[in-house]
Amino acid sequence: MRILVVDDEARLADAVRRGLEAEGFAVDVAHNGVDGLWRARETRYDAIVLDLMMPGMSGWKVCEALRAEENWTPVLMLTAKDGEWDQVEALETGADDYVTKPFSFAILVARIRALVRRGAVARPAVLEAGDLRLDPSSHHVWRGETPLTLTAREFAVLEYLMRHRGQVLSKRALIEGVWDDDFDGDPNIVEVYVGHLRRKLDKPFGREAIETIRGAGYRLAADGG
């Protein structure tokens, strides 16, 4: 398995390289976003470990460029410890997962292996459920021809529902998919955001796209309701 590590902190990047090689990975390293993007374009990798904050070209821009080119190599982003919005933006830009600095190397390896197992999953440019459309790259949502305004978290919840349209998703599944594994708040936060979405997506249009499945969770109707 070949991994690309992109980080402008040379000592950290070298330490990650040595550790991953000890775990049996083949590892290439780039110390800035421009070189990282070039390597990602020229070589087929099983996963990319990408630092968020780099001079010249940030991890956001690298990931955005790859996704725009329909390069779906799994990306694990390294973010600041307390950068909640950095984490949100990393995921919304197209990253598949993130680890906060300073990080446990064991956790880093486990997350990389999980991404490699899932592999590169192609993502349509625009998600559709009937006349409900969502563009992950531009962060635009429409009901028919009517544009809708969503907050970042509402957008993330809707995107997750649309990627799993027709499937019943538990609160826990939504929390793990939209928040993260370490979320320890009230699971009823999901109900709050589902309520927000219903008021914006459904009620003004006389629809019922987001269904409550009693005792199980929520389901976005495959036809958009």
Image (cartoon, rainbow, N blue to C red):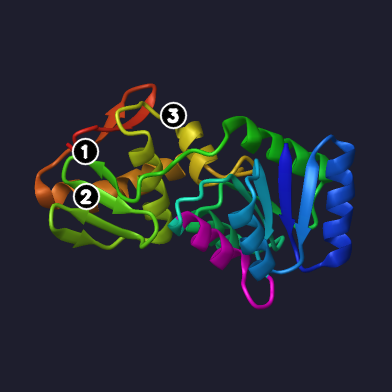
Answer with mark 2 or mark 3, whichever residue precedes in sequence.
3
Question: Does the rendering let one see residue 187?
Answer: no
- Distance between the alpha carbons at the discs numbered 3 and 1: 16 Å
SS assignment at label 3: loop
Left or right of residue 89, residue 51 in this image: right
Question: Picture coordinates of residue 23 (x, y %)?
Answer: 85, 36
Mark 1 = which residue? 209
Answer with mark 3 or mark 1, whichever residue precedes in sequence.
3
Three-letter residue code for mark 2: Leu
Answer with mark 1 or mark 2, whichever residue precedes in sequence.
2
- Taking the spot 45% from the left edge, 45% from the top edge, the residue there is 189
Q: Looking at the image, do the residues carrying marks 3 and 1 touch, with CB atoms under 8 Å apart?
A: no
Question: Picture coordinates of residue 210 (x, y %)?
Answer: 26, 37
For label 2, count other residues whose C-alpha is less than 10 Å away and answer few (under 14), some (14-19) or many (20+).
many
Three-letter residue code for mark 1: Ala
Three-letter residue code for mark 3: Ser
- Distance between the alpha carbons at the discs numbered 2 and 3: 20 Å
Q: Looking at the image, do the residues carrying marks 1 and 2 touch, with CB atoms under 8 Å apart?
A: yes
Viewer-proximal residue, 103 or 185?
A: 103
- Quadrant for the N terminus in the image: top right
